[in-house]
């Protein structure tokens, strides 16, 4: 009996030690990735360098576009057309470098025709006319994130480059420039209107991923691509990482899973991303954190060498969370640019703008809550209209039951004897 008990205890101890070793190894690996990435970005930022990116002539070539979107010939032809038009307008764009490229187009549900194809290129080009992008030091991102995480995000914005070049159809150029201006100034409604009108497809490409990933992942990634689409009531996003060998693919998959778990813990525990049971009932005071937790819970990570794919689908409320995050980031960028151009210190700029009714953190049209910008308080979508109709029907049924109950209480009982 003692021998069986000793073997059982030894086996349990062995299992605990193995599990603890695996958890410790994954934690150390995740810490090395985060710390190494932060040190790399900090070095580039302090030395005044930017991510070099890839030559624009190579990224904007027909062969590169074909390698990215070869399964969609119509999109490739549209992109070739807009790139040729842009390079014919300014041939010096070939001499620049591309750190990131965002390809967007619109396609109605059930339709095969592609509309409004465009390429947003971020990087450095000859004769730059803008400054580095950066977040406001006392803006929303700085208040919500811890200093290290905020510094990392700010460094990434700084390092991507100084210029954003738009390649699009000639008759759509003004609309795309206006959309870009609105996004960089924290106005999200124009983008929401486009999404509600027709699903917006997007692809984000980093031509040189080794320049933006942490040092210990530099040899584990050959390509990074983010693609997806967003409509008024739904959306989906897919992160595709390509690795050179099976070992690197396994490492990338493990890091992605651990980062997703860490992000979920942050939203759930740090920001209170759960519905609280209070004495007066249920309370959802941080609805946006709750939606992010649900988004991370639905994340699916698939490892199939040489690809590691992280896929997630979301609904209208999570669309609003993502759009509001973009809006807040644009608001911080606008504040940083504003006091930079005014050549004043941040607190001096804020004091000078105190009388401006729109100088507060939010824009005049912003609405808090999950029903904006897509929903009852913003742009009505088929899903929000159906949800409102359902709420109205349930409310009418509830009022009818209450009215029936009151009438029964007010009317005399059938068993009550009649007065003589």
Image (cartoon, rainbow, N blue to C red):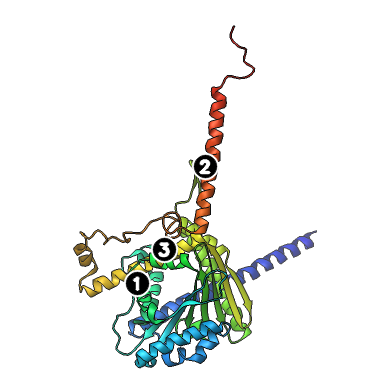
Above or below, 144 against 111 in this view is above
Dot 1 falls on a residue whose secondary structure is helix
Residue 405 seen by the camera? yes
Residue at 47 percent across and 84 percent down: it is 79
Q: Position of residue 330 (x, y in %)?
A: 36, 69
Q: Position of residue 304 (x, y in %)?
A: 64, 79
Label 1 to label 2: alpha-carbon separation: 41 Å
Q: Is residue 239 left or right of residue 10?
A: left
Q: Which residue is mark 2?
A: 395
Determine the residue located farthest toward the right in the rendered image. 1
CB within 8 Å, label 3 to label 1: no
Q: Quadrant of the C terminus?
A: top right
Dot 2 falls on a residue whose secondary structure is helix
Q: Is residue 2 left or right of residue 326?
A: right
Q: Nearer the viewer, residue 55 or 387?
A: 387
Of badges 1 and 2, the one in the foreground is 2
Q: Nearer the viewer, residue 52 or 163?
A: 163
Q: Earlier in the sequence, mark 1 or mark 2?
A: 1
Label 3 to label 1: alpha-carbon separation: 13 Å
Q: Position of residue 195 (x, y in %)?
A: 46, 67
Q: Position of residue 252 (x, y in %)?
A: 56, 78
Q: Earlier in the sequence, mark 3 or mark 1?
A: 1
Question: What crowding class fits label 3: few (fewer than 14 Cα within 10 Å), some (14-19), or many (20 or more)?
Answer: many
Dot 3 falls on a residue whose secondary structure is helix
Residue at 28 percent across and 60 percent down: it is 360
Q: Nearer the viewer, residue 21 or 150?
A: 150
Q: Which residue is mark 3?
A: 324
Q: Which residue is mark 1?
A: 184
Q: Quadrant of the N terminus?
A: bottom right
């Amino acid at each position: 009996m003692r021998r069986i008990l000793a073997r059982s205890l030894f086996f349990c101890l062995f299992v605990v030690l193995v599990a603890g070793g695996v958890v410790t190894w994954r934690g150390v690996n995740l810490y090395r990735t985060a710390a190494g990435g932060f040190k790399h970005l900090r070095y580039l930022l302090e030395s005044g360098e930017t991510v070099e990116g890839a030559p624009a002539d190579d990224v904007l070539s027909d062969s590169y576009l074909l390698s990215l979107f070869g399964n969609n010939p119509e999109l490739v032809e549209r992109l070739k057309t807009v790139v040729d038009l842009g390079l014919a307008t300014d041939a010096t764009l070939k001499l620049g470098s591309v750190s990131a490229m965002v390809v967007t187009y619109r396609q109605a549900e059930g339709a095969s025709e592609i509309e409004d194809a465009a390429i947003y290129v971020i990087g450095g080009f000859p004769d730059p006319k803008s400054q580095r992008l950066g977040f406001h030091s006392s803006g929303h991102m700085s208040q919500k994130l811890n200093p290290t995480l905020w510094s990392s995000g700010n460094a990434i914005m700084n390092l991507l480059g100084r210029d954003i070049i738009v390649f699009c159809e000639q008759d759509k150029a003004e609309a795309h420039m206006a959309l870009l201006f609105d996004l960089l100034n924290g106005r999200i409604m124009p983008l929401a209107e486009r999404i509600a009108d027709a699903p917006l497809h997007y692809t984000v490409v980093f031509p040189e991923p080794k320049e933006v990933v942490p040092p210990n992942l530099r040899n584990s990634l050959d390509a990074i691509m983010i693609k997806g689409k967003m409509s008024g009531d739904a959306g989906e996003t897919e992160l595709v990482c390509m690795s050179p060998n099976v070992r690197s693919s396994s490492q990338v998959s493990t890091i992605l899973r651990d980062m997703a778990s860490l992000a979920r813990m942050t939203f759930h525990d740090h920001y209170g991303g759960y519905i609280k049971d209070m004495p007066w009932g249920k309370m959802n005071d941080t609805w946006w954190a709750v939606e992010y937790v649900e988004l991370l819970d639905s994340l699916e990570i698939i490892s199939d060498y040489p690809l590691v794919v992280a896929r997630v689908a979301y609904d209208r409320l999570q669309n609003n969370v993502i759009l509001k995050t973009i809006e807040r980031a644009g608001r911080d960028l606008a504040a940083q640019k504003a006091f930079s151009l005014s050549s004043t210190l941040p607190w001096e700029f804020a004091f000078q703008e105190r009388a401006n009714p729109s100088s507060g953190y939010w824009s005049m049209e912003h609405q808090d809550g999950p029903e904006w910008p897509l929903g009852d308080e913003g742009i009505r979508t088929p899903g929000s209209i159906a949800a409102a109709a359902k709420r109205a029907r349930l409310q009418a049924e509830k009022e009818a039951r209450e009215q029936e109950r009151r009438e029964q209480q007010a009317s005399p009982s059938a068993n009550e004897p009649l007065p003589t």
